Image: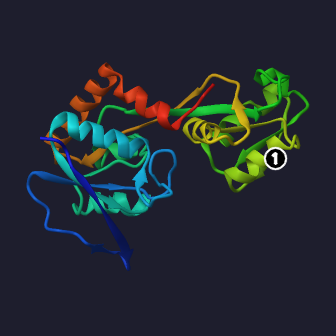
């Protein structure tokens, strides 16, 4: 049976989830909560469809394993709350696997390893490694894994940093040459490069956190097993890499 899914848009009002267009969940279907704006993992395209690595991966796994599901579109925190309160069966939302979260949730095998890369202007052919940053200024986005990594090596390689609150302004800083480079989470910068942002990635990825599909601890073990089995099949037949290549370009 080919897997089918539909999107349910839900609002969190005063701590209560309000559903729009939600039919009674069938026993053969799963309700999967996700984030709303975390490109390239889940985001809304120009036609109003929710797409991304997580969405494509879930659809492919469901088809491979023969189960059906509905998508519950929430913010990240609301998605986790929905799972905790057993109003959904699972969460896929670029969710990092951490020891703290393992106390509440059971995670699938990691389906994506994040990390940090360095980006420079597309026309820049002088900077090829961290050593080339000596005496230069580097752009960072506040609070990101990329910022934390750059801060950990800035004294070693002799560069200074400037902070931005969003990726767009950080990228512009590098494109116009005001900063020599930026450090960004690998999937975020990889997606931006694929969209022609005017930057290129010049370093190997520094290892970061891994993302996993989550269910409540001790519940929905069958769903978790299906996700893992489907993920293994997609890795083996090349579909997994095909999905990644759709959204991330790393040069």
Position of residue 127 relative to residue 97, above or below, is above
Of all residues shown, which one is farthest toward the front? 47
Q: Where does residue 237 sit, x and y in percent of width and height? A: 30, 21
Residue 150 point in image, percent of width and height: 71, 36
Q: Secondary structure at mark 1?
A: helix
Q: Is residue 106 left or right of residue 169?
A: left
Q: How many marks?
A: 1
Q: Is residue 217 above or below residue 203?
A: below
| Occupied quadrant, residue 94 | top left
Residue at x-position 50% and y-position 51% = 38
- What's the image's color scheme? rainbow
The spot of residue 57 in percent (x, y) is 34, 39
Judged left or right of residue 131, residue 90 is left
- Residue 131: x and y, percent? 81, 21
Q: Is residue 126 left or right of residue 129?
A: right
Disc 1: which residue: 173
Residue 83, above or below 239: below
Image quarter of the C terminus: top right
Do we see residue 113 in this rendering? no
* Residue at 37% across, 29% down: 240
Residue found 11% across the figure and 41% down from its top: 1
Q: Residues within 10 Å of mark 1 (few under 14, many from 20)?
A: many
Is residue 251 visible to us here? yes
Residue nearer the viewer, 97 or 124:
124
In this rendering, is residue 46 above or below 63?
below
Residue beneath the point at 42% across and 29% down: 242
Q: Residue furthest left?
A: 27
């Amino acid at each position: 049976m080919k897997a089918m899914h539909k999107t349910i848009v839900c609002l969190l009002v005063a701590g209560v989830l309000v559903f729009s267009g939600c039919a009674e969940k069938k026993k053969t279907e799963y309700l999967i909560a996700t984030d709303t704006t975390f490109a390239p993992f889940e985001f809304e395209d120009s036609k109003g469809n929710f797409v991304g690595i997580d969405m494509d991966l879930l659809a492919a796994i469901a088809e491979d394993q023969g189960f059906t599901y509905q998508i519950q579109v929430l913010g990240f925190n609301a998605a986790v709350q929905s799972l905790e309160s057993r109003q959904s069966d699972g969460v896929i939302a670029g969710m990092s696997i951490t020891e703290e979260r393992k106390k509440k949730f059971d995670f699938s095998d990691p389906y994506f390893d994040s990390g940090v890369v360095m980006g420079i202007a597309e026309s820049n052919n002088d900077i090829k490694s961290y050593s080339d940053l000596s005496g230069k200024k580097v752009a960072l986005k506040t609070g990101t894994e990329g910022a934390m990594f750059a801060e950990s090596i800035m004294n070693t390689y002799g560069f200074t940093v400037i902070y931005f609150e969003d990726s767009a302004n950080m990228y512009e800083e590098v494109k116009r040459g005001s900063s020599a480079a930026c450090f960004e989470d690998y999937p975020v910068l990889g997606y931006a490069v694929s969209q022609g942002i005017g930057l290129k990635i010049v370093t190997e990825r520094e290892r970061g956190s891994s993302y996993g599909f989550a269910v409540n601890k001790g519940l929905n073990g069958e769903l978790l097993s299906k996700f893992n089995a489907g993920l293994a099949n997609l890795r083996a037949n090349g579909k997994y890499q095909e999905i990644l290549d759709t959204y991330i370009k790393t040069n």
